Amino acid sequence: MRRLVVLLVLSFVGAAAFGLSNASSGVNVNGANLPASTLRSEFAAIAATPTIQCYFSYLEQVGLAAGAGGGSLAAAGAAAWSNLRVEGITIDQFVRAKFHYTPDAAALTSATSSLEGDLTQAAASHCTGTSAAALEAMPSEMRTAEITAQASSLYLLSRLNSTIPLTLASMRTYFNAHRSSYDTICVSVALVPAALVPTFTAAQTKGLSVAALAKQFSVDPSGRKGGAYGCYAPTSTSFASVRSDVATTALNTFPTTPLSVSQNGTTYALYVAPTKRSATSFNIASSAVLTDMRNLNASSANTIKQTILDHAAVSIDPAYGRWGQASAGPNVFAPALPSTNDVAASSSLTTVGAHSYK
């Protein structure tokens, strides 16, 4: 469970190179210092090793791209990695202080397997080599820090009352309590140009059927057959999104509020109606059940993680990022660079031209 949440779960334009400065204090978390020299060695390892770069880019969902200078990362990548290290140190400190926990050899071995699994799942065959090779390619101190943080995260999860054990028995219990959430769902759609939405709504209010509405208004090819689009079982990669789209919609009814989609620069209203629901067995639904349980655990984990970070005293060298409050909680942001967006043109800042700003 990466930093409690990452898996349950931009390149910086004109990015400068970060990782080469010698006069830097690095990161400090609650008095524990991560020296700049250590950060620089980790940046260099990521920049120079495609396997590390690829796997952790997918894990963090931020491109850990190499910067302009040797052994450096682009600004967004430097900030993302610094944030990962801050989270790891903070969670390590928390479990040691609150639970007096230090991972033993068995816990570290289990954490290594867990982290390898997280990396593999996140990358989903996008990276060459293996996740084990990515960890092995790290400098010793870097690898130890990542595995220890993983062990601390796993231990903290095990102590949360809200965490659901990911066992076969608990999966069956969860499935039995939420059977209707795993029905196979057949849907019909109507893709309606924005200009026709008022007319569509009026016809819908008059009681036209899903099939009639789709035939009359939908520009999707399925409109010719009354909008029938297909059936989605829990094994389908589209199941989660289909289930979400029709969550509160009655059978054979289009919702009153459509989704908004764009195709080739044109905006359309997308109406999705469930036309049939069929119960499925646990064996068919098991993968979706596991995903749902992981997501619930991730939500619980995110809550405790943000609470821990809210109470952490963090300082970071501006070369590597800035610590601030995001919508989802405290985070390391990429270093701020002067904006050029407000300047109309470079010529307007010369001595012969008047200054012009938008």
Image (spheres, grey):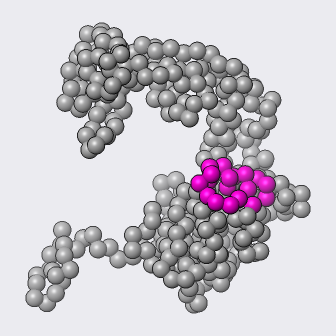
Which quadrant would the C terminus be assigned to in this image? bottom left
Left or right, 168 with reference to 128: right
Q: Nearer the viewer, residue 9 or 309?
A: 9
Give the x, y percent position of residue 107: 85, 57
Residue 63 lies in magenta, yes or no?
A: no
Q: Main secondary structure of the magenta part?
A: helix
Left or right, 228 with reference to 175: left
Farthest residue in the front direction? 128
Quarter holding residue 345: bottom left
Q: Residue at x 52, y 79 (%)?
A: 18
Give the x, y percent position of residue 148: 77, 64
Left or right, 122 with reference to 221: right
Q: Residue at x 10, y 84 (%)?
A: 353
Residue 125 lies in magenta, yes or no?
A: yes
Q: Is residue 82 visible?
A: yes
Give the x, y percent position of residue 15: 43, 74
User: Total of numbered circles in the picture?
Assistant: 0
Position above or below: 231 against 3: above
Give the x, y percent position of residue 285: 66, 26
Task: Provide the residue span drawn in magenta.
Answer: 112-132
Farthest residue in the right direction? 105
Q: Residue at x 51, y 21 (%)?
A: 231
Q: Nearer the viewer, residue 322 or 94?
A: 322
Q: Nearer the viewer, residue 185 or 101?
A: 185
Q: Is residue 314 visible?
A: no
Position above or below: 101 against 262: below
Quarter holding residue 2: bottom right
